Amino acid sequence: MPLADALSFFPGLATAAAELAEDAAALRRLAEWCGRYSPWTAPDGTDGVRIEITGSAHLWGGEAALAADIMARLDRRHVSGRIAIADTLGAAWAMARFAEMGKDPVILPPGDCRAALAPLPVEALRLDPATAQGLRRVGLKRVGDLSAMPRDALARRFGETVMQRLDQAQGDMPEPLSPLGEVPTRRVRLSFAEPITEPTDLMLATERLTADLVQRLVREGTGARRVDLGFHRVDGLVERIRLGTARPSRDPRHLAALFKERLDTVDPGLGVEDMILAAFAVEPLPAEQIGLLGHPAGSEASGIAPLLDRLGNKLGLAALSRLEPRESHIPERASVSVPAAGPHPGPPPWPRGREEPAQLGGGDKPQRPIRLFEPPEPVEAFWLLPDDPPFRFAWRRRRYRVTRADGPERIADEWWQPAASGAGLREGGDAIRDYYRVEDEEGRRFWLFRAGLHGNDRPPRWFVHGVFS
Amino acid sequence: MVQERALLPELRERVRRIERPAATVHRVLPFGVAAIDRMLPGGGLARGALHEILGAGGDEEDGALAAAFAAGIIGRLTTQPTSASQSQTRLGPSLSPLRGGEGLKISPPLPSRAGGEGRGEGGLVLWCLPRPDLYGPGLAAHGLDPGRLVLVRAPRDDEILWAMEEGLRAPGIAAVIGEIGVLPAVASRRLQLAAERSGITAFLLRRWRDGGQAARERALPNAAVTRWRVAALPSQPPRGEPGVGRPRWRVELLRCRGGEPACWEVEVADATGHVSLAATLADRSTTPVPAERFRRAG
């Protein structure tokens, strides 16, 4: 009925605009909150939440107790709901929406789907309204009526969906539930009789949970690379701390310390009633030799792993890197940064002293800058002869007069490499760089290069690529 | 009278221990240049302390010389065996007979908090910087093995200070270095204390965005044990040779706890990061410049 009609019937009607996005978000939050019952939860359409409770009902003292718990908690939040538990997703969906029930949840005993579904209207099969209406028009009003019909005829007339939905509801066809989030490999939960808010309480609970999780990891000989601590608040919101570690870890103190660092970002609101610690990426971690004083007698890398974790979890693991040498003539490719976290297959050693090209004067001078600008910064340069270094250049609002120069050192493009980096290279056919080491009046030393050759269509451009010590 | 003379240094030492109990166990790192080491208390750069390094002129922005100077020091810190001028017994693994003569007791090296093992030879170097423009081959040329480096990139000064402090608490770290623009005095104090406690040597590389920031920050005092300024000097290649000669620096010790400000001109000699006094100026620089205009910095 259009709103205008409704208002004409009943002028005092209270109306509110539908906020579909808000509703969807609220449903999603509800589904997330249901994560306290099982990791396999997902919002269902626009008005439901699916929970896969296989294997987790016993934690709540059986299915009835679980359903009662959900009901009680929803009640407390002034959310009215209908709960059904059945063998299949389809049956539970149908029962929750169409079964005759009072306040109590409907719980179908295993194997009862067929009988329980039979008296329900065909709409209970999650069909689109047109199909359901079509079925009604030919007299098929109840789910039980469908079972009696020849499958081929039904499928031909109403499409495969009808039979598929029927089979799914009756358990003849599997229907997987795609959970809301990633399903953790290991999960431990702690519920509180009274909601907790104090930071010290939260920390204690965190320590307890990490200890629980670690116990299981130790038994399996694995370590966690990613963990997620969820704080289920009384008001149904879920606060999370997500952590990544540089190496698989199962050191309870280490993990707890990582959480502690971030605990102040958690807003407990009116209180936290559940905490769930989940480990996602789990990798094999063999037993480690512990040093005599309780310190791991591991390698250098394992010694700083806790440090890298702390830094990485605050600044992002991408902020941590190491330098590795590469065989390349292109300066910016000769030294690459690789992530510091993660396994290290022993980086190649750096050459100690660089071998010097003879024409550069040889000797033991450091010929590579200590800082390299990537990308190279363009400068305004003035020079006399085609192969001369500039006698003057301007860079970053400053003018420099060149008093001494070395060069050129010609570095050509590595034509066998894809042009991954090196913005100055190749661009406009400037595949050749002539590098000069120049010194200004004050003694500052720069690494300039000229991109492009004289005689081309466009004049050569100058860049500063680095500064020497 | 003679007895009194002997008493005085001992008393001084005791007072120092009371004032800074942790600092006494750390050794020093000599530069290997007598003229410089002579001016430093203990005959070298204090380990387990915070040192500040400034650039000069346009280099305050790029921090090239400061980075090279620090790389040279850290390179020696991580490769040179501990050459102690302050006596300190090495805390390595040791074997001692158990009472009763039943077998041997193996004492492992003390954990790093005790400030002994793992500082001299090995360990990683944590280098915290706002933008990753360090170039590996350039560092290697100054004697710092880039393979030892762990670069921590953080856009903000407070994050860099935090990362440095974390690094100063961690085992397996040989040195911590941070490129800082704005440095609150409290932060420098925290770093100095953390360095003292762990025995890890820390370096602050001052790198300023612009002249205004430099002018504001340059004069502010902080808790670093030494403050150095490294400025480029025009190179002096051998007569008749064209091109750029060996890099020459003016190294100024602006401030030094327990020491006097001084100034040297040095030439960067070889790929090990060693510096030598500039040949032509050796005479002048062995007698340190009085450096009166830097006294205020102390």
Image (cartoon, rainbow, N blue to C red):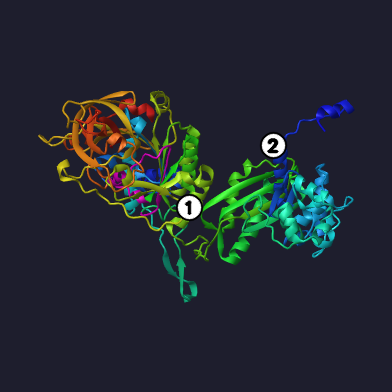
Disc ID at residue A93: none
Residue to which mark 1 is pinned:
B113
| Number of other residues with Cα within 10 Å of mark 2, as a class: few under 14, some 14 to 19, many 20 or more | few
Q: x and y percent of residue A122 in the render?
A: 81, 52
| Number of other residues with Cα within 10 Å of mark 1, as a class: few under 14, some 14 to 19, many 20 or more | some
| Residue A86 left/right relative to B180 | right
Task: Name the residue rendered at 84%, 50% in the picture.
Answer: A98
Tell me the subunit letter for badge 1: B
Task: Name the residue rendered at 50%, 36% in the picture.
Answer: B158
Number of on-image labels? 2
Q: Secondary structure at mark 2?
A: helix
Q: Amino acid at mark 2?
A: Ala
Judge whether residue A60 is colored magenta. Answer: no
Segment colored magenta: B121-147
Q: In the figure, B12 relative to A96: above or below? A: above
Do the numbered discs 2 and 1 sit on residues whose CB atoms are within 8 Å? Answer: no
The C terminus of chain B is located in which quarter?
A: top left
Can residue B202 be seen here?
yes
Q: Amino acid at mark 1?
A: Arg
Tell me the mark number nearer the camera, choosing from 2 and 1: 2
- Residue in front for this viewpoint, A218 or A1: A1
Residue to which mark 2 is pinned:
A21
